[in-house]
C-alpha cells in the first residue's frame, strides 16, 4: 500500500479527435516535471498517476505547475477490496475534525457495491472510528473521496493545478521580455495556452546596467520553470536608441523604438522557428499602448503579435505576477531601456505615414542587421 499522486486533467477533455495527442504530450510533460525527483508518471483510465518520490511536497509543487492539469490529490493506492478500503477510511477519520462527506465513484462497475452503498458504509466506518466527526452532505469541511479504477484510490481534498493546455501543443512564440511586471505575466499566460516560449530582450548598455540584464534572465528562469527552461536572446540596442534620439522627432521616439523592436524580434523569431510575437502591452496603460500606437507597431511586425494582457488592469497583472513568483524580481529598481530616452510629450494617436517618414532618417536595414548579428543567446 503506497501513496501516489492522482492527477486530473482539464480542458484536454474537450479535445475530440486530437485528444490522444494532447494526452500523450501532457503525460510526457508530467513525466519530465517529476523525473528529477526519481518519480515516474503514467496515464491510466482518465487519470495521470505519479509515484516513487521521496519528497511529496516538491512533487506536488512541480505537478501543479504543469499546464493542462486541473487538480491533484495525494491518494492511498489500495486493492479493490472493501475491507482494505474501510480500514484506510478508519485511519483517515482519526486525522480529521469537524464535518465530512464521502464521495465514492466507480469507474470499474464490476465492483460489487454501488456508489451510494459505498458512501453510506464508509461514512459509518469513519463515524465509528472517530465519534467526534459529523456528516454534512452540503458544505462539509472535508471531502473524503474513493475512486474505484485499476486500483481503489482514497484521498481527502484536492489541490488546484495551473489549468490551460499542455505545453508544446500550441506551437512556438517569442516573448519580448523587459524587466517590468507585465511581460513575464504575458509569457506565462501564453505558455499556459500550450505555446512554447523563448524570450528576447533589448539591452542598452551602458544606459541600462549588467544588473538589469541579470534581472531579466532571472525573470526568464522563473517563468521557464513552467516549461523546460527558456532561451533568451539579448539584443544590443544602444546604437539604435541613440540614432533615434538624435535623428527622429522626440514625440515619436518611443513609437519608433518599438517598431525597431518588432522588426528585430520578427527576424529572431524566424530563426527560432517561432510563429508569433508576445508582448506585455495593456490597452491604454501608456502612450505607446493606445489602439493607434499598437497599430503603428503592428504595421512592421510580419508575425502575429499576441497581447494576452490587452484587457487586464495593472492590478490584475500584479496579482498574477505575485502568484507566479515574478513580482519581487520585477520590482527591483533597475531601469529598462524604454525609460532611458522617454519623450516628454509622446504621441498618443500616431498615424503610420508620418512615423514611417521620420524613420527614413535611419538606415533601417543596416541597423536591424547589426542588432541581429550582435545578438547573444543565453539558456536559463
Ligand atoms: P513591462 O512591465 O512588461 O515592462 P510596460 O508596461 O512597462 O511593460 P513598455 O515598457 O511600454 O510597457 O513595454 C511594452 C512591452 O514591450 C513590454 O511588455 C514588453 O513586451 C516589450 N518591451 C519593452 N521593453 C523591452 C525590452 N527592453 N526588451 C524586450 N521587450 C521589451
Ligand atoms: Mg517596461
Image (tube, helix red, strand yellow):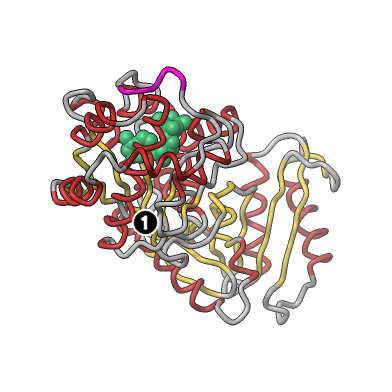
Is the stretch drawn in magenta largely helix, strand or loop?
Answer: loop
Left or right: 14 in relation to 360: right
The x, y position of residue 296, in whole percent, is 47, 44
Q: Nearer the viewer, residue 117 or 11?
A: 11
* Residue nearer the viewer, 83 or 1: 1
Q: Secondary structure at mark 1?
A: helix
Q: Quadrant of residue 17?
A: bottom right
Question: Residue at position x 82%, y 41% from top?
Answer: 139
Is residue 66 left or right of 263 when viewed as pictured? right
Number of residues whose C-alpha sits closer than 10 Å to that of mark 1, classed few (under 14), some (14–19) or many (20 or more): many
In the depicted structure, whether residue 343 falls above or below residue 148: above
- Residue 287 versus residue 40 in the image, above or below: above
Determine if the magenta segment contains residue 202.
no
* Quadrant of picture, ligand 1: top left
User: Of 3 and 36, which appears nearest the observer?
Assistant: 36
Across and down, in percent, residue 198 comes to 32, 52
Q: Position of residue 96 (x, y in %)?
A: 67, 39
Could you say where residue 322 lies in the image, as x and y percent from the top left? 49, 30
Q: Is residue 181 visible?
A: no
For image coordinates 47% across by 53% down, the residue present is 305
Residue 58 against residue 39 in the figure, above or below: above
Q: Quadrant of residue 266?
A: bottom left
Q: Is the shortest distance between ligand 1 and the CB of mark 1 under 8 Å?
A: no
* Figure quadrant of residue 316: top right
Q: Which residues are magenta?
A: 341-345
Q: Is residue 298 visible?
A: yes
- The residue pinned by badge 1 equals 34
Query: What residue appears at the point 46 percent right and 48 percent down from the top-left corner?
Result: 60
* Number of marks in picture: 1
Amino acid at each position: 500500500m503506497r501513496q501516489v499522486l492522482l492527477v486530473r486533467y482539464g480542458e484536454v477533455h474537450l479535445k475530440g479527435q486530437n485528444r490522444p495527442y494532447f494526452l500523450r504530450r501532457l503525460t510526457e510533460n508530467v513525466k519530465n516535471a517529476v523525473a528529477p525527483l526519481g518519480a515516474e508518471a503514467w496515464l491510466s483510465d482518465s487519470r495521470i498517476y505519479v509515484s516513487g518520490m521521496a519528497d511529496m511536497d516538491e512533487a506536488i509543487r512541480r505537478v501543479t505547475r504543469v499546464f493542462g492539469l486541473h487538480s491533484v490529490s495525494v491518494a492511498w493506492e489500495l486493492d479493490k477490496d472493501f475491507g482494505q478500503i474501510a480500514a484506510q477510511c478508519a485511519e483517515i477519520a482519526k486525522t480529521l475534525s469537524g464535518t465530512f462527506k464521502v464521495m465514492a465513484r466507480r469507474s470499474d462497475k464490476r465492483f460489487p457495491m454501488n456508489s451510494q452503498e459505498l458512501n453510506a458504509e464508509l461514512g459509518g466506518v469513519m463515524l465509528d472510528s472517530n465519534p467526534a466527526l459529523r456528516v454534512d452532505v452540503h458544505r462539509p469541511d472535508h471531502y473524503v473521496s474513493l475512486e474505484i479504477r485499476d486500483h481503489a484510490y482514497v484521498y481527502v481534498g484536492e489541490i488546484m493545478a495551473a489549468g490551460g493546455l499542455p505545453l508544446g501543443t500550441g506551437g512556438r512564440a517569442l516573448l519580448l521580455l523587459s524587466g517590468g511586471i507585465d511581460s513575464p505575466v504575458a509569457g506565462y499566460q501564453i505558455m499556459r495556452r500550450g505555446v512554447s516560449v523563448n524570450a528576447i530582450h533589448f539591452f542598452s548598455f551602458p544606459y541600462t546596467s549588467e544588473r538589469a540584464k541579470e534581472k531579466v534572465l532571472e525573470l526568464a528562469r522563473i517563468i521557464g520553470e513552467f516549461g523546460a527552461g527558456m532561451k533568451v536572446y539579448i539584443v544590443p540596442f544602444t546604437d539604435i536608441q541613440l540614432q533615434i534620439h538624435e535623428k527622429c522627432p522626440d514625440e515619436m521616439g518611443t513609437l519608433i523604438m518599438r517598431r525597431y523592436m518588432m522588426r528585430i524580434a520578427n527576424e529572431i523569431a524566424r530563426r527560432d522557428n517561432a510563429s508569433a510575437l508576445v508582448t506585455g502591452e495593456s490597452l491604454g496603460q501608456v502612450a505607446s499602448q493606445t489602439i493607434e500606437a499598437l497599430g503603428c507597431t503592428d504595421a512592421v511586425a510580419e508575425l502575429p503579435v499576441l497581447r494576452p494582457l490587452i484587457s487586464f488592469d495593472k492590478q490584475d497583472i500584479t496579482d498574477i505576477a505575485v502568484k507566479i513568483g515574478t513580482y519581487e524580481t520585477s520590482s527591483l529598481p533597475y531601469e529598462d531601456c524604454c525609460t532611458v530616452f522617454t519623450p516628454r510629450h509622446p504621441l498618443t494617436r500616431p498615424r503610420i505615414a508620418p512615423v514611417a517618414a521620420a524613420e527614413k532618417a535611419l538606415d533601417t536595414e543596416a541597423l536591424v542587421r547589426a542588432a541581429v548579428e550582435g545578438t547573444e543567446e543565453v539558456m536559463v
